[in-house]
Image (spheres, rainbow, N blue to C red):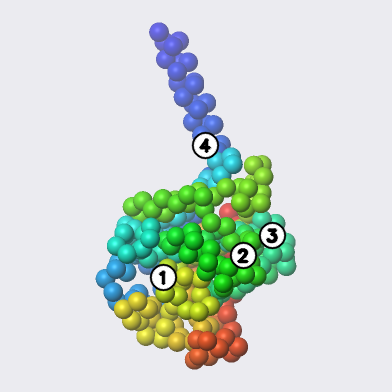
Amino acid sequence: MGNKIFRFILIFLCLSLWLMAATEIQLKDPKNDDKGPGNYTYPTDPIYVGGSFDLTKAIITDKGDVIEFKIYFDAPVTFNWGDFWDVQQLQIYLDFDHVAGSGYTETIPGTQVMVDPADAWEKVVFIDPHTVAKINGEIELKAGAMKNDIVLPSKIKPIGKFLKATVKKADLGVDATADITTWGYGILMLSATGFPGDWCVLMRRVNEYEGQHRFGNGSDGAGDPNVIDMFVDDADGSDDEIQIQYDMLKNWESGMDPEDTSEDKLTVIKLVYPGK
Ligand SMILES: [Ca+2]
Ligand SMILES: [Ca+2]
Ligand SMILES: [Ca+2]
């Protein structure tokens, strides 16, 4: 009898160790920094529930042929008007090689940040509540130059305070043995809209003054980042990461005309390297 229990415990321990060995990355982000460069305010319509854009945690799990991204924020996801959910848009920039100048430094049009050339990315996972047909139409129209490297998840589940996106490794152009702990991650929280600007891929704009459906304390021009929250530094969620984010997102200059981007200077962001 005792032998049986011992054997059971042994099997249980082996199973636990095996489960722990399945590659999983946990990132954290401090609360109450859903203010972009430090001063952005939410739109005034009650659909933008406080905390909806406040990233708190990300769990990235290698499941063999697919990678699962669970991105947590500080309010339950809502279902009032969106095709699949209401207000969040997430972009996950992936740097596979961490070689300076290898990859894109531009981000999806309308995001309005650049990536440091040292962290240039190869693929971006785009998580948006619109239909795949609408998303693909927008990408074709506005992001043609990078369209082959914008990857849509094969499955998205909005549950409680997180979105779970399943992405096929084949769609990322990597094989099953890829080591996700060596990659860089740029996880950005924006807001989705079905009525974006002419050059914006379904993201909501930040204006000078907040409105019913506009964030405030940015610019009416196009130089200000439309990023509300992001993971930074070593993403352990410590308080210093609040200021690091604000400093990263503040170096922009904007003309007043949203359709004339020639006077704009975009701010430059760094990605997070969990394996470093
Ligand atoms: Ca946050
Ligand atoms: Ca790269
Ligand atoms: Ca943050």
Label 3 near ligand 2 (CB < 8 Å): yes
What crowding class fits label 3: few (fewer than 14 Cα within 10 Å), some (14-19), or many (20 or more)?
many
Which residue corresponds to mark 1?
Answer: 194
Residue lying furthest left in this view? 46
Amino acid under label 2? Lys
Q: Amino acid at mark 1?
A: Gly
State the residue position of label 3.
98
Of residue 67 and residue 74, the one placed in the foreground of this image is 67
User: Where is residue 66 shown, x and y percent of the image?
Assistant: 56, 44
Specify which label sits upstream in the sequence, 4 or 1. Answer: 4
Residue type highlighted by circle 4: Met
Q: Is residue 21 left or right of residue 48?
A: right
Q: Residues within 10 Å of mark 4 (few under 14, many from 20)?
A: few
Specify whether residue 238 is in view: no
Instruction: Read off the residue under disc 4.
Output: 20
Say which quarter of the image contains residue 117: bottom right
Residue on which disc 2 sits: 147
- The correct choice, above or below, for 204 with respect to 133 in the image is below
